[in-house]
Amino acid sequence: MAKRKKKQANSNKILTYIAWGLAVLALILGSLVGGYYIGYEEAKNDIEFKVKSEKNKRLSMLKKMEEISSKKDEKNVTTRLKDVLEKESRKSTGAAAHEYGDTALPKPPEAIQREVKKVSAKPKLAIIIDDVSVSSHVNAIKSLNLALTMSFLPPSKFRPNSAILAQKENVYMVHLPMEAQSFSAEEPLTLRVSDSDAEIQSRIRAIKEAFPRVSYINNHTGSKFTSDEMAMNRLIYALKAQNINFIDSRTTADTKAPKVMKNFGLEYVSRDIFLDHDMDKESVKEQIKKAIKVAKTHGTAIAIGHPHANTLAALRESKHIFKDVELVYIDKLY
């Protein structure tokens, strides 16, 4: 009997030890599992925080870059196009002084004397941008969101797409190369004083074919051609036959265009101001102010510039003063 009680007590003790062992094991396993999940959640939260922080950092950086880009766009013509414009300008023309020939004049020929008018309507100013010939010119000019009339050089080996580019515009002109007194970098198919009636008429027909909607042309260089009365007679006759108006860029004070236009019963229209005879941006701004003053005095004015980075930058930065005039395309000037 005593032995049976002792054996039962030992069994109970073993069961107690096993129970305690199982309890301790359960506690250990619970701690491990709990620690794993707690550590996972902490790691997960930490990763999510870091990802969110990096995302916010990138967004902040992008915003700053956009602000910097926006400021640069306001300061320059467009940052991306500036180098292209300067390269194209150097390659094809240089400053506005190139319009006179190799022998640059100290200043552009004065505009003709015009009648002073008191107009009730807002004065009109047309700004022509000469030498347009490649897409970078067009893009830069259009980025200004101003009513600027583009005058395209005829197609050539180095600018084969100028007529195609012009056809995409509602209003455009042709910047027709004419013989200068002295010019080493003459454009292909430049009209010369020695050209016959048939040659000039053929050239103008070709221009009309390349630029079907052209209504206005102005002269590129041409100090020799426009100062020759017979040559101008042949040109105006050919232009009139194609319903094209001539605007004198006035590259010489000796231009015979006023006399010839009068003989044909046509109104003489000419440039009043060259914007970029000097390519310094501040100088261009001063010329813009002069053009506005001419418009206020006479009711209308025509200014001519070129697709140089400084010229377009000056126009962008002068937007606030155009409120005093109505900036119009050339076909809306009169």
Image (cartoon, rainbow, N blue to C red):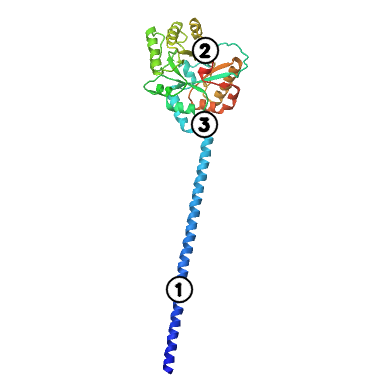
Q: On screen, 175 above or below 28?
A: above
Q: Amino acid at mark 2?
A: Val
For label 3, count other residues whose C-alpha is less than 10 Å away and answer few (under 14), some (14-19) or many (20+). Answer: some
Q: Within 10 Å of the Cα at label 1, are there few (<14), some (14-19), or many (20+) other Cα atoms?
A: few
Q: Position of residue 201 (x, y in %)?
A: 39, 10
Residue labelled with disc 3 = 76
- The x and y percentages for residue 227 are 47, 9
**Residue type indicated by callout 1:** Ala
The number of discs equals 3
Q: Residue at x 49, y 19 (%)?
A: 97
Q: Of marks 2 and 1, which one's residue comes earlier in the chain?
A: 1
Who comes first in sequence, dot 3 or dot 1?
A: 1
Q: Nearer the viewer, residue 302 or 15?
A: 15
Work out whether residue 157 or residue 237 is closer to the camera in this orientation and state it.
Answer: 237
Can residue 86 be seen here? The reply is no
Residue at the bottom extreme, as displayed:
1
Residue under label 1: 26
- Looking at the rendered image, the quarter that the N terminus falls into is bottom left
